[in-house]
Amino acid sequence: MTGPAGPIEQLDAARKGDRVALARLLTIVENDSVRARWLAAVTWTSHRAFSIGVTGAPGAGKSTLTDRMIATSLERFTAPGAPGPVRQVGVLCVDPTSPFSGGAILGDRVRMQDHALDERVFIRSLATRGHHGGLSVAVPDALALLGAAGFELALIETVGVGQVELDVAATADVTVVVVTPGWGDSMQTAKAGLMEIADIFVVNKADRPGAADARRDLDQMLELGTGRDDGWLPPIVETVATEDRGTDELFDALDALRARLDGDVGLARRRVRAASLLRRVAAATIAGTVEGLAAGGPFESAVDAVAAGELDPYAAVDALLAT
């Protein structure tokens, strides 16, 4: 398949460790739907990076925890099919979009500066601009790109709990939901969704008052059922990320789940994620088609006809789609 000259060389360079080339390709994934589609055709059939999504409410300490996870994963985490601990870790920080520049707000990345000069680690923020379908489409493409570039593990840190986070959870191999003492009062409306997406719960800042209450709240929710049919009961791990406490216990849980995903359970989960992704890509593609129809002269003529009562909206849409 022939693609634009730039991305071909950049992909080859990224596979050889060129981080600038990798960053440019991720920019294409975010902003350039046409070239991103070509890039996906090349990268989706390559090596896949094992992905861990880290989500939770703002202020839960996700960035600090992710920072600790980077270091620990390089020491002990083994991705499926790998002979030993991962050699490269990619981190995608799903950030809110600046209302002024359209770019990602990079505040959380400040907490990961210990790895800024580590050649084994690549950290990139993704904003919600650009790509049709937003991050729900861009993140899977970015993960495919990281895998094609030789990364064995990708960490996805999201900014909060909402639709974007649910979409990212539907993309990651494993989803870690981070809560803090006192979480029950502020997260009631999100509990049902959390139960469905969480593979592992982390009670971070467990040295603070209320940590036992948070754990008890989670235990009670788990007793009521998770809404899952794969037989996995999400474990609850207590951490103090600022002191690197509990990180090993978190990776014990990740190791157990990763081993479980090597067989039929993993295949079933990948099929569920693939079905979810196909729906999102189809919706994004259709949305792009609608935007294209709305930008042309026939659309303006249809608007005039419907506004004047000369044509009903269904007939107008049928005529537009026929073009």
Image (cartoon, rainbow, N blue to C red):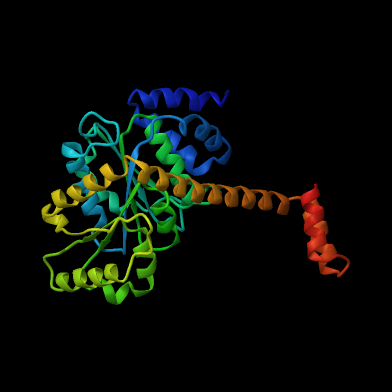
Quadrant of residue 185 within the rendered picture: bottom left
31 left or right of 268? right
What residue is rendered at 29% in x and 36% in y? 80
Location of residue 202 by image quarter:
bottom left
- Between 138 and 45, the one lying in front of the other is 45
Vertical arrangement, residue 41 with respect to residue 93, above or below? above
Task: Please provide percent x and percent y for residue 254.
Answer: 23, 48
Can residue 96 be seen from the camera position used here? Answer: yes
Image location of residue 200, percent across then percent down: 26, 56
In percent of width and height, residue 308 lies at 86, 69
Q: Residue at x 22, y 44 (%)?
A: 255
Question: Does residue 228 lie above or below 143 as drawn?
Answer: below
Relative to 40, residue 191 above or below: below
Q: How many numbered discs?
A: 0
Q: Residue at x 42, y 22 (%)?
A: 12
Residue 181 visible to the viewer: no
Quarter that holds the N terminus: top right
Q: Quadrant of residue 59?
A: bottom left
Q: Tell me: 26 left or right of 108.
A: right
Q: Between 294 and 202, which is closer to the camera in this rendering?
A: 202
Instruction: Provide residue 289's location: percent of width, then percent of height.
Output: 67, 49
Q: Residue furthest right?
A: 310
In the image, is 283 to the left or to the right of 92? right
In the figure, 317 relative to 120: above or below? below
